[in-house]
Image (cartoon, rainbow, N blue to C red):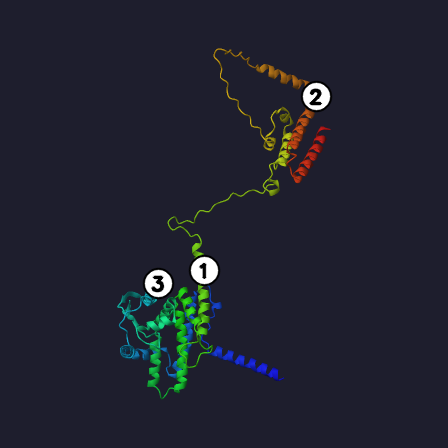
Amino acid sequence: MEKLQSFFKKIFLCCALLSTQIALSGIDLQLHRKPRNVSTYNWCTERARGFVQQKRSVMLKMLNIANQDEWKRTKKSLEREYKSECLESLNEKEAVSQTPFDQSTRRCITNILKKPSVKRKFKITNIIDKGNIITVETAEGEEINFVKIENKEHPIYSTDQAVCISQAKIQSIALESEIEAIIGHELAHVLRKHAFEDYCMKRTYELNEKSAPDEKTFNEALYDFKRAYEIEADIVGTFNNLHLAQNLYDFFSKRTSPALPDKNAEHPSYKERATYMSSIAWYMKIEQAAKIQKRSKPRFDRQKRSAPKKVVRKKITPTPCNKRRFKSPQSGAIKGLAEAFRELRRNPKQIARKTKPSRFIGKLKPRTTQVKKAPQKENPKTKKPAPPQKPRSTSSAQTKEAKRTAAKKANPTIKKEAKKSVYKNFFARIASMYKNLKKKWPITEKIATLSTLACLWAMTYKLLF
């Protein structure tokens, strides 16, 4: 019983830990519900925006702000104050190093700024390198500065106007490819103005401290909001680029942190960040593979306005000769026999007169090639004149035919004998053909030819007798 009680206690503790992890865990992207016509990047950014909006609404209720329009007005009133404070903090608190950026960090900054998706988002017009400061000019007239600082606590952080990088610290933490992804994350903070919103919330709480709740509850809600916009920066910072997503996942997977984030932690746990970044990278990879497959398909030629020519294959009619079992050189034997019988039924006299074998037997028999003899040279001395040939008289041939017809009419027995001679010639031809091809024939064709010969014999017997 004691063992069972201890076992159930362990299960209960595990369930409690899981429930707290689910409650404190950030975002559920629900990528399995994503429609096909929506990209992974757009789907995830929309989910992250909704998640941040949910946390923002909780904060605004605490600060007694009725709606979004009122919150926009408060932000406008605090904008000038925030900018002046940012400049003061850079000049006084942070020591801006006079040495220029290292070649590797400069390469990372320029690589990410030259990406077409980043250029499109920020509307970048010009990049000016001043050594320790790299300024980016936008179409709206704003400037984003990449400043080199000497800070040992924070390797990289951002305000709405600058991205401060501690070169020595960041190079010790991450690889060059990972630094590029981290810079992308900080640019996302600049794009969505998270630092300014955080400042506005703190300032409004200070102004309305009497009506607002306890400092402890406010700080818990604020840290929860910060964790939400860190998740949004992770997703937006990929800028629809697979390599940036993979590099950011590599950076998070290497780090170790507690599985459950602290209530006063500004960032979510590395484990949680690695899980959603891996799923985003995986779905992006599938999308990229689908795009490559689409490009490989043949498209319409724009100049000719027509599809590429297709190779049209001739359709072969399914005859017994086309089948595999009739592929041998004797494949036309049965067809030839049937043809011979048809010819016999039509005009039996014509076959009796023919001296050469018919065309179907010619195909089956191996043809003998006649070697032409070279013409012999005639000696002019021993040359004899050729005897004159007598022209054939047409009257003699006509008289012979007339005599035959007369004899046939007189004697009916001659008619029968002529018919018999025709059929004898026909069967002699079939027998010679069978003898020539008998050795190489397969069994199926032998059976077929024998059956046809038997049918022919029976039919001719009926015709004759």
Q: Quadrant of the N terminus?
A: bottom right
Q: In which quarter of the image is the C terminus?
A: top right
Specify the label residue 289 is tagged with: 1
Q: How far is disc 3 from disc 1 in space, using C-alphas? A: 20 Å
Tell me: residue 3, above or below residue 31: below
Query: Given contact means CB atoms under 8 Å apart, are the residues at marks 2 and 1 in contact?
Result: no
- Circle nearer the viewer, 2 or 1: 1
Between 100 and 440, the one lying in front of the other is: 100
* Among numbered discs 2 and 1, the one appearing first in the sequence: 1
Q: What element carries label 2?
A: helix
**Residue type (three-letter) at the residue carrying disc 3:** Pro
* Among numbered discs 3 and 1, the one appearing first in the sequence: 3
464 vs 189, left or right, is right
Q: Quadrant of residue 321?
A: top right
Q: How many labels does the image show?
A: 3
Q: How far is disc 2 from disc 1 in space, using C-alphas? A: 88 Å
Between 280 and 211, the one lying in front of the other is: 280
Tell me: residue 83, above or below residue 42: below
Q: Write down the residue under mark 3.
A: 116
Q: Write down the residue under mark 2.
A: 414
Q: Is mark 3 on a helix, strand or loop?
A: helix
Residue 253 rendering spot, x and y as whole percentages: 44, 71
